Structure formats: C-alpha cells, structure tokens
Amino acid sequence: MERDLTILVSLVLSTVLPATLPVESAGGRRTEGGLYLFAGARVLVSFLLVLGAGMEQPLCLVRNGPNGKLSLNPKVLKVLHGIGQPVVVVAIAGPYRTGKSFLMNRLAQRRRGFPLSHTVQAQTKGIWMWCLPHPRRANTTLVLLDTEGLGDPNKGDNSNDAWIFTLALLLSSTLVYNSSGTIDQQALETLGVVTALTERVRVRAGDSRDAAAADVVRFFPGFIWAVRDFMLELLVDGRRVNEDEYLEHVLRLWTGSSRVVQEHNKLRRCLHDFFPNRKCFVLPLPAEPKAMKHLEELDEGQLRPRFLQQADAFCRHIWDTAPVKALPGRAAVTGSSEWRWWRGTRWPRWGAAGG
C-alpha cells in the first residue's frame, strides 16, 4: 500500500511541487519539493483511465483518512491506462453542504452519480472522479472531479482543505467554485486559500517566491463562480447587472494605501492575477424546500424552471467552452499521456494533529 501512495500533487510532469513541506531523500538528505521520498525513483505513469468508454459511476481517486492523510485509492491503480483521447477536466470546490455533487451530476447528465446527502454531515470525502464521453466533442473525454467540501467543522484543520483545493486546482482545466447565498466577505475568505497558494506550490524546485507566483499562473484553470440558492436581485447602485458584472463588482479594487484598503485588496488582487478568465452563474434553489431531501428522485418537471434555465446555461457554457487540459508549451494532455509522477512516496499527514 505504501508503495502506491504516489500519484498526486506533482502534476505537470513532476514540475509542480508543494514547497512548504520538507523532503527527505532515500539517503536521508533533505531537499525541497514537499514530499517525503524513500527508496523510490521517478517514473512515467498514465493519469486518467478507461477514457474512451467512460465510467459507469464515479470512483474515489483521492481518499481523505480520519487522520487527515491523503492517499490514492489502490483500485484506481488497477485501471490506470491510456486511451489517447484529449481530456477536459472540470473540478468543483467550495464550502461543504452547498450542493456541489448535485451540480456535477447535472454536468454528467445523470440523475444519480456523485452521492448526495441531505443532512448536516458532509457526504463527499477526498476527491471523486467520473470519466464520461464529452457530450459536445467527438473523441474527447469529460473528466469530472467532485471534491470534499471546505470548512467542515469536524476536521478542525484548514491545511487539509488547502491541499484538496490545490489538487483540484492543478488537475483541472476549468475550476468551479461553488458557494451559497451571495458573494460576500465570508465567501471570499473561504476562498482565501488561494492567497497562500504560492507558499504551497512552485513550478520548479528552487524558484523564488515571486517567480513562483508569476510562473504557476500558467498552469491555472479557467474559473467559474457558481452562487447557489441565490434569491437577490442583480442590482448595483440601482442598475441591473448581469452575473459577470456582479462578480467583477465584488472583486473591484479600492484605491488608497491604508491598512483597511490593503486588506480589502489582498485577496481580490490575488484572484485577479490567478484567474484572469472569470465567469459567474447564479442559481436559485432547485426545488421547493420540502422536496430538497429527494433531489435524486425528482423529475425535471419537479425542478424550478428558473433553476433549470440557469443550470442549463451553466452546463452549456462548460460543454462548449471548457478547454482541453494542456500544459504550457506542450500538446494537449490525453489519457495515454505519460505524466511524470513521484512513485514510492510516503505522503505526510496533512491536517493531522501534530502533522
């Protein structure tokens, strides 16, 4: 099992490496890179699986253990092989219990798939993957990644959230950030994990902090903010605005140099820099409150028309515009692309007490 805890974080041909954790080589020498290495060598491994025919149901790609340790599901290793198709990778992240899995099932055009929960307890743990034929593009696979919700009070440690978010960010060609109600300061602060991203990820070991911030953006996906259960009017200063204008209004920078201004602008400037391609969708509650416990059982006619309209616009936008996953200066990533990963790696216990 320990030999197989290997296929995460160092996406993009082993060039993206978390830089906040020490690395100890097989000989005991500490180096940079963010992993604990032992008696293992870097090898070429395929990432995605059985892409041509698709998967009947999602599989857990990354497991999040009770001690906060992230690990690869060994069953995934048995099916990791290439087909040669380009892949469009869409990941969703955001606060827990905000309907991420339901929205991803809409993208998959399936009523059931990613499991839903209608209690206060989070359902999705780790990262789940679903590979399906792309509904718009021939010979292309749509890869959906549903991630564990951020801010679960039962975790007690934000670092575990940060690593799951970082993995989703690096693996995807389009990242959906899902929140509920409105884009307020709390929603922005939940997304604040991005402000620390350059502390966690460097494109090349040994890069300076400034170089890391500039270079890592080349690997970032497109960004979509999905605001769920939205019940407000899109009005700013008495003027009706569209969803994208609403997002840009929230992300606008203040002028001045006071501490308040600097704090206001810090996260917003980071989002401007990291996600130059941004879009927003607002979606109302899918159904009447009493029916929300049975979303998987509801027919289309039982869902609210406005939700169906907005969800359809969201899905069509992703199907039509989400790009194939590609690496800067390289061809599009395919299921059979041999990506360099670290093998024979023991993962640190991110989020575990004392880890």
Image (tube, helix red, strand yellow):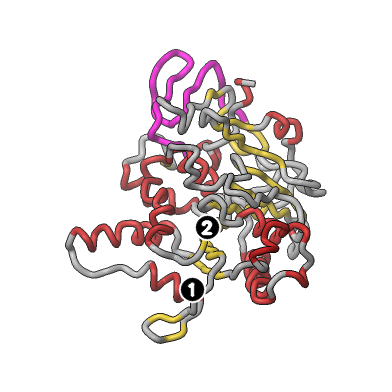
> Disc 1, disc 2: CB below 8 Å?
no
> Which of 57 and 124 lies nearest the eye of the viewer?
124
The quarter holding residue 49 reads top right
Element assignment for label 2: strand
- As shown in the figure, which amino acid type bears the numbered disc 1? Asp
Q: Which residue is identified by label 1?
A: 244
Q: Which residue is identified by label 2?
A: 177
Magenta part of the chain: 15-43
- As shown in the figure, which amino acid type bears the numbered disc 2? Tyr
Label 1, residues with CA under 10 Å away: few <14, some 14-19, many ≥20: some
> Does the magenta segment cover residue 24?
yes
Between the residue at mark 1 and the residue at mark 2, the CA separation in whole angstroms equals 14 Å
Left or right: residue 160 versus residue 84 is: left
Seen at 42% across and 25% down, the residue is 23
Give the x, y percent position of residue 325.
61, 53
The quarter holding residue 58 reads top right
Give the x, y percent position of residue 335.
70, 45
Residue 11, placed above or below residue 291: above
Seen at 63% across and 72% down, the residue is 310
Give the x, y percent position of residue 185.
37, 61
Seen at 79% across and 66% down, the residue is 299
Instruction: State the mark number for residue 285.
Output: none
Residue 133, placed above or below residue 162: below
Q: In this rendering, does residue 23 appear at all?
A: yes
Q: Earlier in the sequence, mark 1 or mark 2?
A: 2
Left or right: residue 322 versus residue 208 is: right
Seen at 41% across and 71% down, the residue is 248
What quarter of the picture does the C terminus occupy? top left
Give the x, y percent position of residue 53.
82, 49
